[in-house]
Amino acid sequence: MKRPEPKNEEIFLDPKRYIVSKTDEKGVIEYGNDYFVEISGYTEPELIDKPHSIIRHPDMPKVVFKMLWDNIKQRKNMKSLVKNLAKDGRYYWVYAEVEPKVDPVTDKIIGYTAYRKAASRKAIETIEPLYKKLREIEEKSGMEAAEKYFKGYLEEKNMTYDQFMNTLIEDKGLFKSFFGKMKKIFG
């Protein structure tokens, strides 16, 4: 499937709705809720059995996804602020939490569930310059250099990646409650 050409046009998400998708252990989409299908602009058949990266916006630094995969492969939930790409080329920003699913018999990771909600303007304005810088470093010096820069950035702030993401979430109680509810429904 051909990737859409990005447009400088944002899709504003309903802050009361959520996006949920489930993938296998390789990141291939197995399920997407109705809002995921609606916002992505793809039909359900177009999404199922495709890599989740189908919605990855080229403005997103690769290092963010590397850190995500590094953490969730260690069975840690990972939060992130993500700019996604819809089928028509428009974009939308989400707070996302990705949770690994483990087979209780084999104790192996068998998939991932991603819970997403509309990101705030303040969070987007905070993260966009950093993501732009990380992309520039990736283009000039590679992902390893971008990862070193990002780790240095976090060290300077005396924060872990999770702590930094938590600073971008304005109402932490609501966010925690939201993801707790989604995990009960879709987990």
Image: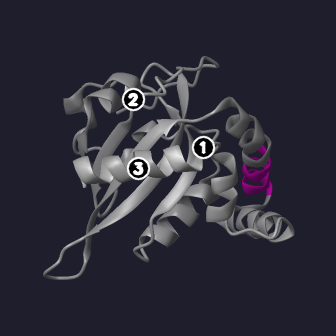
Query: From this viewpoint, which residue is outermost toward the left?
Result: 105
Residue 34 horizontal/vertical position (percent): 26, 28
Of the pair 65 and 102, the residue shown nearer to us: 102
Q: Are marks 3 and 1 in contact (CB under 8 Å)?
A: no
Query: From this viewpoint, which residue is outermost toward the right?
Result: 156
- Please report whichever mark, 1 or 2, sits nearer to the chain's N-terminal start: 2
Q: Which mark is residue 171?
A: 1
Start and end of the magenta stretch?
Answer: 132-140
Q: Taking 119 as reference, is 179 above or below it?
A: below
Query: What amino acid type should be assigned to the residue bearing mark 1?
Result: Asp
Residue 58 horizontal/vertical position (percent): 59, 39
Residue 72 horizontal/vertical position (percent): 44, 68
Separation of residues labelled 1 and 2 (CA atoms): 16 Å
- Looking at the rendered structure, the secondary structure element under dot 3 is helix
Query: What amino acid type should be assigned to the residue bearing mark 2?
Result: Arg
Q: Is residue 44 magenta?
A: no
Q: Nearer the viewer, mark 1 or mark 2?
A: 1
Q: Are marks 1 and 2 in contact (CB under 8 Å)?
A: no
Of the pair 88 and 161, the residue shown nearer to us: 161
Q: Residue at x 64, y 19 (%)?
A: 8
Q: Which mark is residue 179?
A: 3
Separation of residues labelled 3 and 1 (CA atoms): 12 Å
What secondary structure prevails in the magenta region? helix
Q: Nearer the viewer, mark 3 or mark 1?
A: 1
Separation of residues labelled 2 and 3 (CA atoms): 12 Å
Query: What amino acid type should be assigned to the residue bearing mark 3?
Result: Phe
Q: Which mark is residue 17?
A: 2
- Looking at the rendered structure, the secondary structure element under dot 2 is loop
